[in-house]
Each structure stands twice: as C-alpha cells, then as structure tokens.
Amino acid sequence: MPDCPAPVTVESRFIAAPDGLSLHVRCYGPATETPHLPVLCLPGLTRNEADFEPLAMHLAADGTRPRRVFALDSRGRGRSGYDPDWRNYNPAVELADVLAAMAALGLTRAAFVGTSRGGILTMLLATVRPELIAGVVLNDIGPRIEPEGLMRIKRYAGKIPQPRDFAEGTRLVRELFGAQFPGLDDSGWLAWAHRSWRQAPDGLVARYDQSIAETLNDISPDQPMPDLWPQFDALPEVPLMVVRGGLSDILSADTVDAMRQRRADIELVEVPDQGHAPLLAEPATMARISDFLFRCDRSASP
C-alpha cells in the first residue's frame, strides 16, 4: 500500500534583507522533525514563490521522506517589499538577500531548486559560499542563456496590460505562453493567472514590481548576457540535476551537452511540451526531483 501523506504545516515568514527591505518566505514543513535536507526554492526574474507550491507540498507531505521546503520571494516579487531603486534588482543584491534569508531561517546547508534567475543565483552562491549547497536542481537555466529567449522575455516583462479580471488574465497568459506550453489545459492557465496577478480594487495587479523590466534595458541580440561557465564550474561536487523544457528557448540542448561534458554526473530531466520554464508540477517530474533529493540526503550523510 502507498504511504500516507505526512501532515504539513504551511506559513509565511517575513525577514529583513541586509538593507532592511522586507522579504517574504513561504515555509512548508512536516509536523514532526525530519532528518532530510531542507530545500530552498528560488524563482525566476518576474516570478514568485507560488510557482513552487505543488512541488513544495509534494516534498513536505512525502510519507517516507518528508522534508522542509522554503520558497523565497525575491525583492520586488510576490509579497516581498518593492525596492525604491530598480537598480537594486541585480544578482549581487539578490544573492545577499538569499544569504540573509538562509541565516534567518537557520539553514546551514540546503538543496536548492532554482528556476531561471533562481538558478543563476544558485550558481553565484557557489562562488562565495559553496559549503551551503548540498544539491542543486537547475530549472531551465545554464551557463549560457539563449538571446532569442531573453529577447522574448524583454518584450513582455513590465509590458503586459492590466487585466480586469482573472478570465481576462487567463486569456493574456495563454496568448503569451501558449506556444511554449501547448499541452496546458484551462485550469492550468487559470492557475497561471492567479500566480501572476493579485486582486486589487480596480482590477488585477502584477505580482512583481514592473520596474524590474528596467534591468533588461541594455540587453539586445548584440549585447546578450555574459556566459556563466566560471560560476557553473564553481558548483561543489554535490548531486546536480538539470530540468529542461523540451520547447525551451532559454536553455538549449547544445548548452546542456556542454554542461554534461564538464559534469558527467548531471541527472537530466527533459519535460516535453513545456518551454521556459517547466512548471515542476507534473507527478513524474515531482517524483524525479523527490528521488534526486533523497540522493542528496545520502551524499550529505557523514
């Protein structure tokens, strides 16, 4: 018989960034102590902690190996404070926020699940505090970001019209991302809309500071983001998983091949019919991540 799901507590915590800005963390945990590694989830450029809710609940409620999961809203996203200076929406400041969050949460070592921007922050963390990292899941991100995908993000970030209601919001996200997620059904698009906007008196409001788009001003096909191979190479010799959307225009198959030439032990999960970034909500994908994290547990054991 399958194991019964473990009881899970879910709560929000607010902690101070080094400059005093409020950072929101969604905390998922089994009701009793667990010997398994905690997991810290870091979302994409304009995304928020809600993207990880299905995975976090799956991991925390695992009947045989429940674990604590923390999903961070980066500054300017979700329920974290908005920075009055958009120039502070940069990887260096956000990395300092990650370190502050780990200290406040008492995390001396964790497995990381980083989606897009969150994966970049994880690779940057490896250059300054590799001992904090017990395992890594890079969700549709690698040392090279495809210019085509980056320009696609630049075209919509901070420019999506404000929907009047969630029906209109659902239509907007389907129009924007339908080509990247052709298999998503009506309920999936509605859930996407709820993760992207919150209700306000005069309509829906984006769950991120629109000025984050300013950070992409200097990005162009002739001026792409610099490669991050040194940061990737700094990842410690801990278990490493790469999740790639089969339709991704951010992480190419060629880049994954180059990553595997450097790290032959990479566990690769390719999610068909999903682009950037895979939702990490399908049972098969969540099961693979759960098994991978158990491998991280064994690797971290003395």
Image: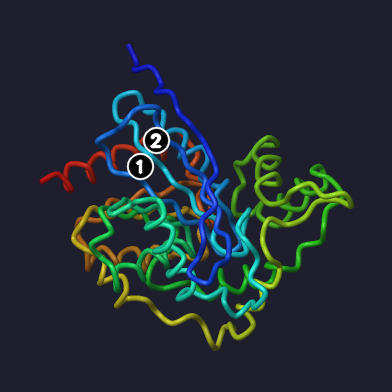
Side of 171 relative to 53 (left or right): right
Q: In this view, does 179 lie above or below 170?
A: below
Give the camera-side residue of 283 and 32.
32
Do tag 1 and tag 2 residues touch (Cβ < 8 Å)? yes
The disc at residue 59 is: 2
Count of labels in the image: 2
Identify the residue at horizontal 42%, vertical 63% (top origin): 100
The type of colouring in the image is: rainbow
Picture coordinates of residue 29, whole percent (x, y): 42, 35
Q: Residue at x 77, y 53 (%)?
A: 172
Q: Mark 1 points at which residue?
A: 289
Residue occupying image coordinates x 27% and y 38%:
36
Q: In this rendered view, identify the residue nearer to me: 21 or 37.
A: 21
Quarter of the figure with the N terminus: top left
Which of the numbered marks, if any, corresponds to residue 177? none
Q: In this view, does 152 lie above or below 24?
A: below
Tell which residue pokes out farthest to the top in this image: 1
Q: Looking at the picture, which amino acid does disc 2 mark?
A: Leu
Q: Which of 174 and 9 is in front in this view?
A: 9
Label 1 Cα neighbours within 10 Å, binned few <14 / some 14-19 / many ≥20: many
Q: What residue type is labelled 1?
A: Ile
For label 1, the SS is helix
Residue 238 percent location from the top left of the image: 21, 56
